[in-house]
Image (spheres, grey):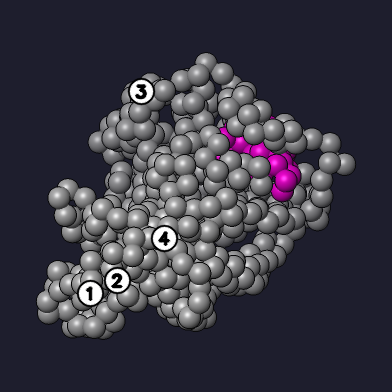
Amino acid sequence: KCNLRDPITRYIPELQDRVDIDTIDWDSITLETLASQLSGIPREYPLTDRDYGFDSPSSIGLPPVDGSDVPPCGWNRAGYRPCTRKEIIDGFTKRLPSFQPNYKATYSNIAFVLLGFALEDMTGLAYADVVQSTIFNPLGMKRATLTKPSDSEGIIPNAHMARKNNRLKPPCSELTESRTGGIYTTTSDLALFARSILTNKLLDQATTNAWFHPRSYSSSWSFAYGMPWEIFRTGDLLTDSDRVQTIVTKAGGLHGYSSQLLLIPEYDLGLVIFAAGDGHALSWLREEVLKSLVPKVEEISRSQVSDRLSGLYSSSDANVNSSLVLEFQDGSGLVVTSWISNGTDFLAHHAAMTNPKLKAGHVQLIPSNIKRGTNGQVWRAEFIQDELPFEGLVNMNLVVDVDSFTYASRSLEEFVFQLDETGRAMRVNLPGFRISLDRQPRKGIAVAVGASSHRLMKPLGLIH
């Protein structure tokens, strides 16, 4: 095991000899900053060096250079030769930093080449063998490989897309850059990988939850970097709700191919898109699929919440006047419309406890993604104001304070639904009230179906 906060120099000690006042401060760069695009190191080596690609660099205004500064490997005027680890380190460490570590996110492929070298140092295995033994074999990804398969195994893009100066580009398996993007696979195999993430086959739930969170933000409000995800947020997929969807993605492209893996944790939904040729096709296809698919999945989730949780819950003891009415409401999700405890209107008291000066609002139930016992599902109650007393630059009418009130050390805002084998609630336990309420037949209970802000059942699926 390794610590993500270990400096990269622990695993690539050659970098320690390359530090001076102007060069990259390798001792301050950790495995985590490399994986999170926060290292501040340049993007490539030697892939984008402009010495190669023109008959005469001076034709675009570049000056003559000493040949000792030209990368000796990769594509150059002598042709193509794969870079060795030593050549990568010797050449790249001549580069100056783009930013200070942890100052600003900027995409770097070479960061993952270095992480690949570090992984080889940790395990004593070649990078391809590590990936094969820890990912491909356990998940049954039988058609995934870092070695170029036969051309008959897949689609070959237009020849001009895979050539540079009329020379066929080398297969990814020959590139040192295979550590940053050189896996040959199928949509079915990549779907296996996506499903393993969503079902916690390789990582536990808590680690997966943390993995999906951003590590840094870009200059766009809608885009952030994860580790190593590209995370997008949009409020345009649901026309009848202003709720924001978070889409966790990883994209790549090389030699006329482009691909993207998209995960929407809210629904446990994954998409796998491969394209050959024009890379714009992938962007168009992604947009059209998301705009069509997400509203349909949301509709299914709303219907499941309404069917499986909403309704009247009351005590089985005729001498106890305690009950709940849960309704699925437009724009709010699962809402408590009536809450009687021992003959007292606790719904009114809940609002007063939250803040006596609060304007009109409602109590909304929020899933916690926690299971209790064999068939228990935990939700939390939260008072949401319908209008803000003050409209400023930041909208704070959000769920920020959960599980605020207890009674004799038990939560007054915890709802534990006991589900039957079909996933429908049979009763709800209220720990703070020391009572269980049975779900009653849905006679006379009007349930409105509308825009959800939370859902019960996540329809797990991979589209590819």
Disc 2/disc 4 C-alpha distance (Å): 14 Å
**Residue designated by label 4:** 438
Judging depth in this view, the residue of 30 and 313 nearest the camera is 313
Judging depth in this view, the residue of 252 and 81 nearest the camera is 252
The answer to whether the residue labelled 1 contacts the one labelled 2, judged by CB atoms less than 8 Å apart, is yes
- Where is residue 206 shown, x and y percent of the image? 40, 41
Q: Is residue 325 above or below residue 232?
A: below
For residue 10, which numbered disc appears in the image? Answer: 3
**Residue designated by label 2:** 339
**Residue designated by label 1:** 345
Disc 1/disc 2 C-alpha distance (Å): 6 Å
Of the residues under marks 4 and 1, which one precedes in the sequence? 1
Residue 186, quarter of the rendered image: top right
What are the residue bounds of the magenta stretch?
Answer: 169-190
Of the residues under marks 1 and 3, which one precedes in the sequence? 3
Amino acid at the residue labelled 3:
Arg
Residue closest to the far left: 356
Amino acid at the residue labelled 2:
Trp
The answer to whether the residue labelled 2 contacts the one labelled 4, judged by CB atoms less than 8 Å apart, is no
The secondary element bearing badge 3 is classed as helix
Of the residues under marks 3 and 2, which one precedes in the sequence? 3
